[in-house]
Amino acid sequence: MSGFLPDEPSAEVRVSPNFGPRRDPVKPDMIVLHYTGMPTGAGAESWLCDPASEVSSHYLVHENGHIVQMVRESNRAWHAGKSSWSGVTDINSCSIGIEIVNPGHTLGYPGFPRRQVDAVIRLCRGISARHAISPERVLAHSDVAPGRKIDPGEKFPWAALFAAGIGHLVAPAPIRRGSVLKAGAAGAQVEALQSMLALYGYGVEISGIFDRQTEIVVEAFQRHFRQRRVDGIADRSTILTLKRLLTSLAG
């Protein structure tokens, strides 16, 4: 990629060899946010540019807000792995991947510094404007790969992004006591829950049985949209929050 000029004006360029052409569509219509899950940002940056790793992302955002672009937005970075959304399984071809430096759950999982979040917002604004990406297509890695991935996690400040015009969010319904749907449940209510999750985009089979995959997808949904409690149990708060999201899309 000789003569590589950054798509994001404020980004430093460090070229990764781990990329290819987009398959279909040619133009990205989704942003996927990750955390690096490594001890240091320098180590993560090197790994994403190492041909032996066979992984990459379009951007990396360090804790201090410094942005590095490694793959052109027009190319297909290798960031999402096995994943799906709204029936599409080649997420790499339809998305732009942003890695956010954070050691992740296995290494203490600190919060995300304000300077870093501000840089992510600025970056997402630019990408969304360049590619006309709709707010509901700004997603977590855990959304498109539930169970396999849990990043950027329940500490990621989606509300700050939403306040800045990035992403899709509603106020989560309050957590209260009441009936729940959980592992082992079956019937029309479970089928309705699965149908709503699938309608929003999650990869879940509509079976009417609250199986392990349904629990995993509910947990992924909570990690993004109802962060206060992530337990894979579809309580009233979870179901009402999901209904609000779908209603806001319809409106």
Image (cartoon, rainbow, N blue to C red):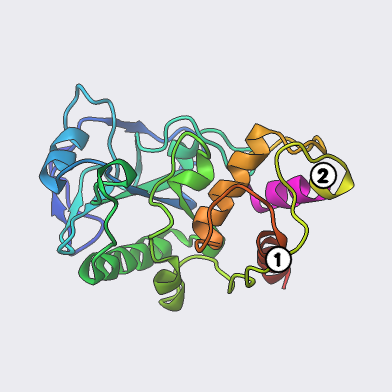
Q: How far from the left and from the top, in percent, is residue 213?
A: 64, 34
Identify the mark at residue 242; answer none if there is no mark: none
Please, what is the three-letter code of the amino acid marked with disc 1? Arg
Q: How far from the left and from the top, in percent, is residue 124?
A: 36, 63
Q: Is residue 87 left or right of residue 205?
A: left
| Foreground pick, 183 / 154 | 183
Please, what is the three-letter code of the amino acid marked with disc 2? Glu
Q: Earlier in the sequence, mark 2 or mark 1?
A: 1
Residue at 50%, 61% (x, y): give it. Answer: 227
Q: Specify whether residue 8 is painted magenta.
A: no
Q: Is residue 16 left or right of residue 195?
A: left
Q: Specify whether residue 200 is painted magenta.
A: yes
Q: Is residue 170 above or below residue 197?
A: below
Residue at 50%, 54% (x, y): give it. Answer: 223
Quarter assignment of residue 75: top left
Q: Which residues are magenta?
A: 191-202
Which residue sits furthest top?
Answer: 52
Distance from disc 2 to disc 1, alpha carbons, whole Å, reads 22 Å
Other-residue count near label 2 (Cα within 10 Å), few / some / many at <14 / 14–19 / ≥20: some
Identify the mark at residue 177; answer none if there is no mark: 1
Helix, strand or loop at mark 1: loop
Q: Is residue 15 left or right of residue 187?
A: left
Please name the residue that numbered disc 2 is placed on: 191
Q: Is residue 78 left or right of residue 59?
A: right
